[in-house]
Amino acid sequence: MPDAPAPRLVLATRNAGKLRELRELLRGQVPGLDVDTQVVDAATAGAPDVVETGTTFEENALLKAEQTARATGMIAVADDSGLAVDVLGGAPGIFSARWAGRHGDDAANLELLLAQLSDIPAERRGAAFVCAAALALPVGGGIGSRTERGELRGTLLAAPRGAGGFGYDPLLVPTGLDRSCAELSSEEKNAISHRGIAFRALLPHLVDALT
């Protein structure tokens, strides 16, 4: 039985959902690329966790992509994303996942944000999901990189709605729709999501790097 082809691309995450999305985005785009075995996550590639010390989504995405590329010698992709609320000056922003103090506590994050916006009328509850996607590849003795940005604008509800998605999805109703992101099907959400927009913008550069 022949050996599986060697990995060629690493996504700087341990999130299985994000890896699945990237594989589907790349499927059929690069001749000879077996996305199921050659596109891997950070754990499979043996890449270390990267501390997000940047002050913007772009800086954090680049940190993860560039450090992962250096550690593995492979082309690397990373993203950083969050919720930017207009009346909070763009907060929680890069602190979205730990807004209430503990990383990944969605219920606590939602509760705190709703409390902070309790007196804000509907017409002033504008916000956007933001994603920066970064590509890094070893070039000679250094690293070449670029980033792309995606945004999904909408309005924040006064109470969560919907059981799908994750994070702040139950609060944001995308502009032009009457359902929260947590009430959309995965296909509907992926078609308009901030992450989908950013990665689709990065795709031509990623295909070039892999071809």
Image: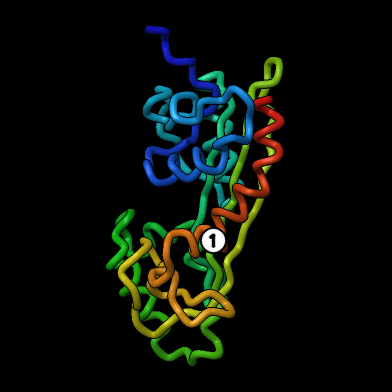
For the N terminus, which image quadrant? Answer: top left
Q: Where 62 sits versus 102, above or below? A: above
Residue at 58% x, 78% y: name it. Answer: 175
Residue 135 in which image quadrant: top right
Q: Which residue is mark 1?
A: 193
Residue at 45% x, 36% y: name it. Answer: 50
Residue at 50% x, 42% y: name it. Answer: 24
Q: Where 173 sits versus 80, above or below? A: below
User: What SS does tag 1 mark?
Assistant: loop
Q: Position of residue 76 (x, y in %)?
A: 56, 31
Mark 1 Cα-neighbour bin, 10 Å: few <14, some 14–19, many ≥20: many
For the C terminus, which image quadrant? Answer: top right
- What coloring was used for the rendering? rainbow
Residue 169 in which image quadrant: bottom left
Q: Position of residue 35 (x, y in %)?
A: 50, 30
90 with respect to 47 (left or right): right
Of residue 122 and residue 166, the one placed in the foreground of this image is 166
Of residue 46 and residue 209, the one placed in the foreground of this image is 209
Q: Position of residue 103 (x, y in %)?
A: 33, 54
Q: Where 111 sits versus 95, above or below? A: below
Q: Position of residue 208 (x, y in %)?
A: 71, 31
Looking at this view, name the residue that lies furthest to the top. 1
Of residue 118 and residue 32, the one placed in the foreground of this image is 32
Q: Amino acid at mark 1?
A: Ser
Of residue 12 and residue 8, the one placed in the foreground of this image is 8
